[in-house]
Amino acid sequence: MQRRTFAQASLVALAAPALAFAEALEKPKLTLAVGGKNLLYYLPLTIAESLGYFKSEGLDVTIVDFAGGSQALRAVVGGSADVVSGAFEHTLNMQAKGVKLRAFVLQGRAPQIVLGVNPKTMPSFKTVTDLKGKKIGVTAPGSSTNVMANFVLAKAGLKPSDVSIIGVGAGNGAVAAMRSGQIDAISNLDPVITLLQRSGDLKIVSDTRIVAEAEKVFGGPMPAGCLYAPQVFIDKNPQTTQALANAIVRADKWIQAAGPADIIKAVPETYLLGDRAVYIDAFLACKNALSPDGTIPDAGAPTAARALQSIDDSLKSVKFDFAAAYTNEFVKKAQAKLAKA
């Protein structure tokens, strides 16, 4: 009887921190939208989920996966999701349309997007101008992979209308589209890119998995995957926003200390695309491009704005409010919390 009483008391003690979190959080149960969760671009999100970091913050997060970031963005704007794990530049793009979104923790410090051509359909490829009139596969039209493709095209003097953009997703569908010759080029991420590279089905043109190359391409630090939400959500739910930031910063730091074997154990088997060795290579190629601590660089918003303005004439006269596009306040508190732990 005494043992049973002790066991019950222990369970109550273990549950107490979680209950305290749940009481402090304004919205412990929420929906998070993402476009291509299997991508290494979103690895911190997967780690925060699989290692229980959201749960330890008292959060019950339902993650809804879409084919691309533009669809995840539509979910939060339409009200079917509370928060997005997506590309930073969407906060600026939507600001120009009068929609107030704000990034509050970083997952990637470089886009990790690779633009490459299909050696089968373009064996004589020499320069980006050769892509005129060709089909380029992206995760989803309007997503960050589309923005990257448009940006590289613009630097070569081509307009978005000079090519055909086709949504191919972020998994086996993208690989199949490339191998079957349905597309002439692809703008996508790992593990798709490494899988195509290893099988000889991709010739790389621009690789922003390399931080230095990303900064050279975009002319400065280009923040990538982040958590962003409507400013109204952040204002109403500061403790919930803080809990999300805590979980992602913890995941960011765990990834930097992790080895390939740790990553393989932590991600779902389906993310490996049938080849663990490919996924490990992909992780090693992307690791440095992932954020080490969740901080959004101050020069990042101006860099993203320049990229958007170079490919969208309607944005050229827009005066962006960079301070309204992101905040590091939640990240600073998350880092302080981890330092004390």
Image (spheres, rainbow, N blue to C red):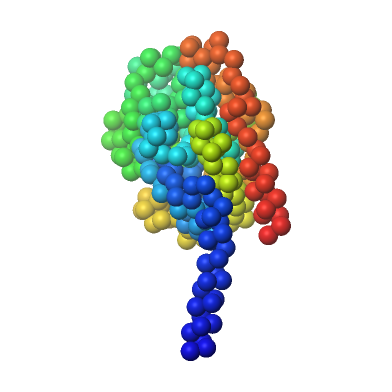
Residue ID at (42%, 34%): 76
Residue ID at (66%, 28%): 299
Where in the figure is residue 65, as x and y percent of width and height?
38, 43
**140 or 89: nearer the eye?**
89
The answer to whether residue 248 of the structure is visible from this angle is no
336 relative position to 168: left or right: right
The count of marks equals: 0
Residue 300 is drawn in which quadrant?
top right
Where in the figure is residue 286, as x and y percent of width and height?
54, 43
112 relative position to 271: left or right: right
Residue ID at (53%, 16%): 309
Identify whether 265 is placed above or below 176.
Answer: below
Residue 322 is drawn in which quadrant?
top right
**Image quadrant occupied by the C terminus:** bottom right
123 relative position to 42: left or right: left
Identify whether 255 is placed above or below 224.
Answer: below
Where in the figure is residue 277, as x and y percent of width and height?
45, 54
